[in-house]
Image: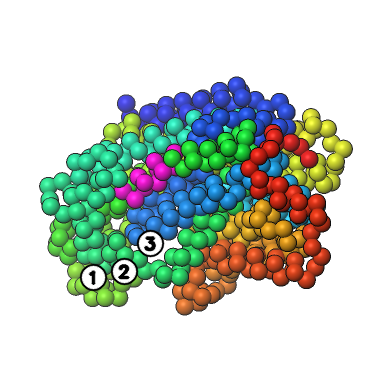
Amino acid sequence: MDLTTLTYIAVGLSFALYIGIAIWAKASTTGEFYVAGSGVNPVVNGMATAADWMSAASFISMAGLIAFLGYGGSVYLMGWTGGYCLLAMLLAPYLRKYGKFTVPEFIGDRFYSKTARIVAVVCLIFISFTYVAGQMRGVGIVFSRFLEVDILTGLIIGMGIVFVYAVLGGMKGVTYTQVAQYCVLIVAYTVPAIFIAFQLTGNPLPQLAFGSTVTGSGDYMLDRLNQVVTELGFLEYTTTSKSTIDIFAITLALMVGTAGLPHVIVRFFTVPKVRDARSSAGWALVFIAILYTTAPAVGAMARLNLTQTVQTGPVGSPDGNLVFEQRPDWMKRWESTGLLAFEDKNGDGKIQYYNDANAEFAAKAEQYGWKGNELKVDNDIMVLANPEIAQLPNWVIALVAAGGIAAALSTAAGLLLVISASISHDLLKSTFTPDMTEKQELMTGRIAAAVAIGIAGYLGYNPPGFVAQVVAFAFGLAAASLFPVIIMGIFSKKVNREGAIAGMLTGLVFTMGYIIAYKGVFITPILANTADNWLFGISPEGIGSIGMVLNFAVAFIVSKITAAPPQHIQDMVEQIRIPKGAGAAVDH
């Protein structure tokens, strides 16, 4: 059976499963729509949380980043995984103990201020829409390649699927759909990795193959990779060009950003007890680890296979490069998406793939008759193209397509629900139209989710960057705005509403301004995005860590010079930290 037919079958069956679950788990109350009725089993919630958290960035883009950045890409692994430990220890059980529907609701109550709640909603919407832009771009990439439709058509199909199960089922429907999506994405990620690991090293476990020798030689895979890429002028795969302070800042921003992501936090409101919140965080970590311990091997194997496909012989030899007319079919298919491109700069009809930014290698390249790098490969296609590069069976490639779509849709649905809950519950029901009935609130939540899906689709069609880059911005914004105020809300009795509001606004404005200045999100960059221009040598991807420090500092200073929180608020903070007495999540 041909690849296109297999892909349509795999993707079609997964869509039928998601829609069937949405109909079965339709939400009928606001409690079911916002927090799935707070009755989800911790193991099930752990699996749903893993799917919610492992987005298109994890599935599609992270291994691509590792493939091209090598050791430098490990900041994403460390940051995102470490953040989960912070979330499990510092936030999840306490927020579950508090037992409300949304993060802004907790902030509004703890800081006894509707203004603080509205500012939290603004931060949440900024973070969620930035994040969802990356997810929808992932949906467009997968559809455009595997269903062979244009990106707009692919986005419309993806939006339609999310609309059905997010708007109909709310958090209840999304929870059980995410369980199915986790199963699809983890199988889709690990099966090709096992095939390729066995093909390259004879060891089927990718985690072990990563440190094994390449079949037919005594070279360890990373040694071989170092040799192959340095011969083409690239940095050694096992080193990085990032400074120590930048690695630290990016890792920290990703860690605290993960812990502050609203769509992940809200998942811990869906379990019955505080103990279940801790338990589900542990289960989620187990499920996440399966993919995250596989990703380094996937990235390294993809880089090795790609380089050896193009560099077919000794570097600089007359027959050392792939002839363009003889390129494999997978290259032709990705060329049609615009995510892989070849330009014959020296007119020899062969593909030269090397680091033309390396001044030392330039003299060698000139001797070979090369006029610049002729192959551009988007980071986001490496995982999706990996099975094709390794010439695996078509059913494996179709499986990867279904997995990529599952990863993008699961996170997009979680984000859209958080946006819809913030608008219907925090802004309308609790602030501007308190007389709204439960039925009207439920309908408003569904309308808000539908509008958010439309905006997300637009952002997916006009993304401000590649998937992992956009997602890193979202983590930076979460680190600088919501994480500090939640931590201070739980662990400090002294921070008051004025301090919380000033801290959130400072962190959000500073981080957003820095990112826009250097990256030019939706506008032309104002400053050159180079290390010598960065504040303290910290890149836009890591600036959320400085935004977080500013948030803490401003909040404590402003709280010090204004009135202390009321006594009942200070008592409430003490009560949150006692691990007993939590009830079901309740409306407020």
Mark 2 or 1, nearer chain start: 2
For the point 60% across and 49% down, the residue is: 91
Tell me if residue 572 comes above or below residue 161 in the rendering.
below
Query: What secondary structure do most residues of the magenta stretch adopt?
Result: helix
For the point 35% across and 66% down, the residue is: 240
Near mark 1 (Cα within 10 A), the count class, few <14, some 14-19 or many ≥20, is many
In the picture, measured across the screen, residue 304 lies left or right of residue 459, that is left
Residue on which disc 3 sits: 72
In the picture, measured across the screen, residue 188 lies left or right of residue 202, that is right
Residue on which disc 1 sits: 365
Quadrant for the C terminus, please.
Answer: top right
- Front one among 152 and 222: 222
Counting from the top left corner in percent of width and height, residue 20 is at 56, 23
Counting from the top left corner in percent of width and height, residue 584 is at 69, 33
Mark 3 or 2, nearer chain start: 3
User: CA–CA distance between discs 3 and 2?
Assistant: 20 Å
Amino acid type, residue under disc 1 in the picture:
Ala
User: CA–CA distance between discs 1 and 3?
Assistant: 26 Å
In the picture, measured across the screen, residue 333 lies left or right of residue 48, that is left
The furthest residue to the bottom: 532
Question: Does residue 446 show up?
Answer: no
Residue extent of the magenta highlight: 287-297
Tag 2–tag 1 contact (CB < 8 Å): yes
Amino acid type, residue under disc 2 in the picture:
Asp
Secondary element under disc 3, as helix, strand or loop, is helix
Residue on which disc 2 sits: 356
Of tags 3 and 2, the one toward the viewer is: 3
For the point 76% across and 54% down, the residue is: 570
Tag 1–tag 3 contact (CB < 8 Å): no
